[in-house]
Structure formats: C-alpha cells, structure tokens
Image (cartoon, rainbow, N blue to C red):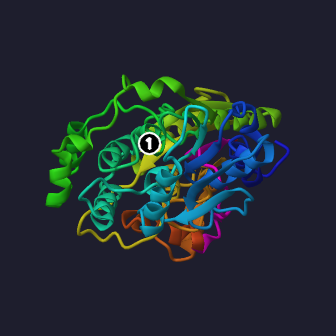
Amino acid sequence: MRQEPKDFLDNLFKAAVGAADPLSTLAGFLPPPPKGRTIVIGAGKAAAAMAKAVEDYWEGPLEGLVITRYEHGLPLNYIKVVEAGHPVPDAEGAKAADDILALLKGLSEDDLVLCLISGGGSSLLAKPGEGITLEEKKAVTRALLASGANITEMNTLRKHLSAIKGGRLTVAAHPAKVVTLMISDVPGDDPAVIASGPTVPDATTSRDARAVLEKYGIEIPPSIDAYLNSPTSETPEPSHPVFKESRSEMIATPQMSLAAAADIAASNSITPVILGDTIEGEAKDVAAVMAAMARQVKFHDQPAAKPCVLISGGETTVTVRSGGDDTGRGGRNAEFLLALAVHLDGLADVYAIACDTDGIDGTEDNAGAIITPDTLKRATEAGLDAKEYLARHDSYSLFDALGDLIKTGPTRTNVNDFRAILIL
C-alpha cells in the first residue's frame, strides 16, 4: 500500500462522501421545465446543496424554500434556505413547514413542484398534527432517540404525528406535477422512509405507529393518543389518485458511496469486501461481529486474503439506559469504534474508521473517529479506561483525548454511516 493506513481510510471516507455530493450528481435527474411555475421545496441535511445544484443547472425561472440543519445552509439567489433544529424539531422548522404549504396553494396542472429530500428531513419539516403541540412532539422524538428505535420505526411514528409528511405534501400540491429527487440515508432506500416520505404514498397505519410506542414503552400525552385515534392521523395510501402524476428519483444512495470507496481501495491494491449497505443494530453488537470478521481475515484469510478492507454502511443505534450512568458524549460511529477497539484488544495490523457521511456523528462536532492497533495502549498510557468510557457512552471524550476524532464540518449530504476496517 502506497499510503499510511490512516490516510488510506480517510481517503475512502472522502470518496464515499464525494459520491453523494448533489453538486455533482443532481443535474442529470432534473425534469424539463413546465409550462407554468416551478416551485422548489425540500428538507434535509443536503437540502441547501441540492437547491444550489438546481439553481446552477435549471433553465428558466424558479422560486421556493428548503429547510436544512443549522450550519448546513448556503447562500442562494432564488430559493430561500431556512436552518432549523435536528434531530429534535424546533419552531424554525415548524414555521418553515407552514411557509412551504403556503407556496403550494393555488397551483395548476401546468406547474411543477420539484421536491428535494434527504436524511434529516423528518425533524426539519416539523408540522405536528392537529391538536399536538411542538413541545409534545419534541418530547416523543427525544424518547425515541434514546430508546434504540431504528430509523424506519421512528419515521413510521413521525408520519402519523405530522400534518405534512407521509405523502401529504403531494396532496397539498395537487393538481401540480410533483417530482422528488432524493438522497437516501435509510436501509433499503425506501422513498417512504427517507425524511418520512413527504411526497410519496405511505403503506403504514396509525396502528403501526402505536405499535412502535408500545414496543419501546414510550408514554404519550392525551393529545397524541387522541390524534392517533382520529382518521386525520392516517396518511394517503398508494392508491390515492394524486400520486398518478408524481415520481421519485434516487440521485445518491449508500451503495453508490460504498462502491466509490471500494474503487479507491482496489486502485491501492487493497481487496475491498462490501459487507452491506443496510447494517443495523446496537453499535456495540455490530462492533463485536465485525471484530470477529477482522480476526477471521487476519488469521485465516477469509472471506478475503490480506491486505483487504471490510466496507459497510447502514445505521447503528445507541440505547441510553434510563437512570443509568450515561453521562458521556459520543455518537453511534464513535461508540462503534470504541467497542471495536475493545474487542480487537490491540490486534496487530488492523485499523478502522467510522463516520457519518453528513459530517456530524449524533449531536457532536465530529464526523466520527479512527482507531489503530495501539488505540487501547495509548488510552491506558493516558490514564483512560476504554471499557469504562464505553460503558457510559463517552467515546467522544476518549477519542478527543487521543487526537483521533475526525472533524469535517457539515458535508451537506447524507447517505448514512460509513465504516471501513483495514487488515494488513
């Protein structure tokens, strides 16, 4: 290998992010201009970059509004960018959602609504259902985030507590044609799950939403209980006629990013093994399995001979125990890496990186981190007990002390987590 292991892994991550950059991928998916108006709307961590790509390549007049996470905005000429709260919704997102609905009023069949959707849109496009306050919805969101619920479960509930998600935006835009361009951050790339599918039909029901609450023991106020019992909480089904004139396109997916990283590995004479783009589960548990796979490569050259790199995507979870000593800092990628380091226990010639492609691991200022064969040794020498830090979900603090955090700032895209384990 011509590069240092840490530089090599960093380059794989950069390739994964680059493959999902809307400034280089969106143009080929733009529809032809309509006879009437073009209204651009959208929500997600990539919304500002996607809107910029539209402005750069669109032929004809346009107007609109997109919502993105704080510090993820860009200055645009025709499309307004609003920054709002993520992963917990706030008043800015709620107001912007109302403004988007106002833009869709009075459209005709000659008009086009171009909707730009990416991960994070569920929290950013915040308009609670009738009778539910934003504070009540925020409380449920926080409880779900701490419960270990996966993204599909979270978005099932979000859709049925919303006045705008689960296909309701397409209903609001009717009779205009709706074209949705999406960057996937969910396992399976299901359009109905990405940002809770604001423009696509929904096959889930309010009963499914209740099942999520019951599964994780989430307590709800009377207002949410009443709303889920009302017909208003049901989302438009696939058979709804408004969807006949709408379509969705994926402009970037996790698999595309994994493939781009694999190409970089192969060009460096490192055999890439893509384990999957839909890996979910508790971060610690996924780390245990992947540590075992790294050992299998190290000692038995299976499933590939050394040197190789195990590449994967998806979204792990971190369950915070109620009443436990969970006083630390760190997102799911840093927790995965700390658990991986503990399981590898200093195994020679094994390096790993794990980062969120949006540049923000959880709610911290890092994208992720990197581990080396001497991570545990360096931690011990610094007086840090890795197992203790892992037990209290304090991976950020440990990697910060070791200088092994990766900080990119917002990437303005999002195809979920990227993990690569290099075995030399």
Residue drawn at point x = 36 percent, y = 22 percent: 239
Horizontal and vertical percent for residue 361?
54, 59
Quadrant hosting residue 54: top right
Residue drawn at point x = 64 percent, y = 65 percent: 404
Horizontally, is 424 left or right of 113 in the view? Answer: right
Check residue 417 for magenta coloring.
Answer: yes
Q: Is residue 72 above or below residue 228?
A: below
What are the residue bounds of the magenta stretch? 401-423
User: Does residue 263 appear in the picture of this structure?
Assistant: yes
The quadrant in which the C terminus is found is top right
Element class at badge 1: helix
Q: Is residue 94 above or below residue 199?
A: below
Check residue 356 for magenta coloring.
Answer: no
**Residue labelled with disc 1:** 172
Horizontally, is 271 left or right of 280 in the view? Answer: right
Horizontal and vertical percent for residue 370?
62, 57
**Badge 1: few (under 14), some or many (20 or more) residues near its Cα, within 10 Å?**
many
